[in-house]
Image (cartoon, rainbow, N blue to C red):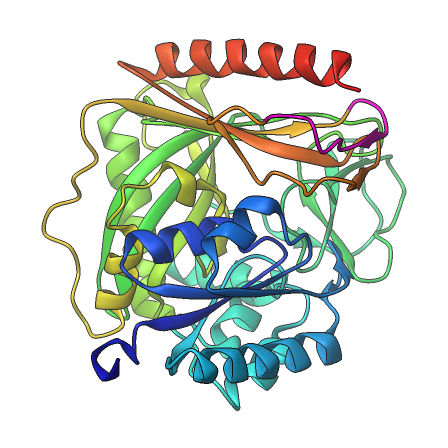
Amino acid sequence: MAGQQARAVLVVGLSARALALAARRAGLAPYAIDLFADADTRALAAAWRQVPGDGAGGLDPEALVCAAASLERAAHESGDVLAGLIYASGFEAAPEILGRLGERWPILGNPPEILAKLKNPRRFAALCRDAGIPHPAPHFAAAPDAGWLEKRIGGAGGGHIRATPAGTAPRPGHYLQRRLPGTPISALFVANGREARLCFLSAQWPDPGPAAPFRYGGAVRPAAIPPQIAAEMEAAIRALVRATGLVGLNSADFLLDRDAGDKGDGWALLEINPRPGATLDLAPRAALGWHLASLRGRLPRRLGLGRRAAAAAIFYASRPIRVDGAFTWPAWTMDRPMPGAEIAAGAPLCSLRARGANPEAALASLAKRRQCLATRVEIAP
């Protein structure tokens, strides 16, 4: 029992399922807190707690602290000692809540000060400017023309982004950013505070909803990137790691303008997420091991991605759905809601995954599975 005491971690976020799975693959016992308490999160976790919240403000602070204390007691009763806390999405708008948790449990990742710096539009733009990294600077006055997007400060997932009419000022807690052409590209990387190792690049796409034209849809790896541009993206990541002291698994979101050809000016960095991001599901089994080793200064020598491509996507409900207990979920679904859960129209129902010999094959398999699930949901009781 004593040899297992340091093998337990709190995994916390709006959705903790991906972290719980990564922790299990790393030989850890995850104690999970999130907004959904999906069936597979419960199955993966040594214990779990569901707390209220929303995508804009994150998890309720008081309920979150109480849930973490409750799980610490549950871990103790199981003979475990929590080594610390690994966080997912949900703290970008309120790093101080992460700070409250960090007063009691070690944060196994970037501290709230780094999160706050990178999610402050002005401070992040200054970091990019000082490092010579292409980045569309924030704008806090009325839009001078129609080519601007409004984004929520600390927003994540793309659902908060809106096109802004000319002459419209950003709402409180929001800012404007010039709309650029290009394909969304995400880089998963691991850092040790001084250096960084690029794990992989993935191409992303939106899944527009009536009130969320830029909400996140999914991603496929590897992304076909001209080598020169890929090298420049990695250099930008390394420059920001040196400037900020980033550690652990992180993601960087870029826009790649494929019409720019192989020139070195066809991309821009949009943001850094100083935590494991949405593409964690595309990472190999060793990913969380890389994360924890990097906190001790070690970066992986080999990535072990394999030759097969991988894709994952969110399946949004097209109508209100009440999950029936008789519904059987295919093995390639994730984030499965519990029987009786009420899913609103436009809300995520679950996630899908697929693999293939190349990105095109992985995407084709994903599309077939999406259609299969849509048919099953339509005829489900």
Considering the image in quadrants, where does the C terminus appear?
A: top right
Q: In the rendered image, which quarter is residue 33 located in?
A: bottom right
Considering the image in quadrants, where does the N terminus appear?
A: bottom left
Q: Is residue 264 left or right of residue 141?
A: left
> Quick one: 130 or 65, which is closer to the camera?
65
The stretch in magenta equals: 318-328
> Quick one: 320 or 157, which is closer to the camera?
320
Q: Give the residue drawn at x 70%, y 59%.
A: 153
* Residue 325 is one of the magenta-drawn residues: yes
Residue 66: % across, % down: 67, 81
Q: Residue lying farthest right?
A: 167
Q: Give the answer, above or below, for where 66 lies relative to 375.
A: below
What secondary structure is the stretch in magenta mostly built from?
loop
Instruction: Count the labels in the image.
Output: 0
**Residue 281 is at least partly visible in this image:** yes
Q: Is residue 307 left or right of residue 329?
A: left
Residue 297: % across, % down: 19, 72
Q: Give the residue drawn at x 52%, y 69%.
A: 115
Q: Residue lying farthest left?
A: 301
Q: Is residue 198 left or right of residue 44?
A: left
Residue 260: % across, % down: 41, 20
Q: Give the answer, above or below, for where 42 lies relative to 147.
A: below
Q: Residue lying farthest front?
A: 326
Residue 330: % across, % down: 52, 23
> Quick one: 136 or 37, which is closer to the camera?
37
Q: Give the residue drawn at x 67%, y 41%.
A: 337
Q: In the rendered image, which quarter is residue 215 located in?
A: top right
Q: Give the residue drawn at x 28%, y 71%.
A: 193
* Residue 326 is one of the magenta-drawn residues: yes
**Residue 265 is at least partly visible in this image:** no
Q: Give the answer, above or below, for where 110 lies relative to 14.
A: below
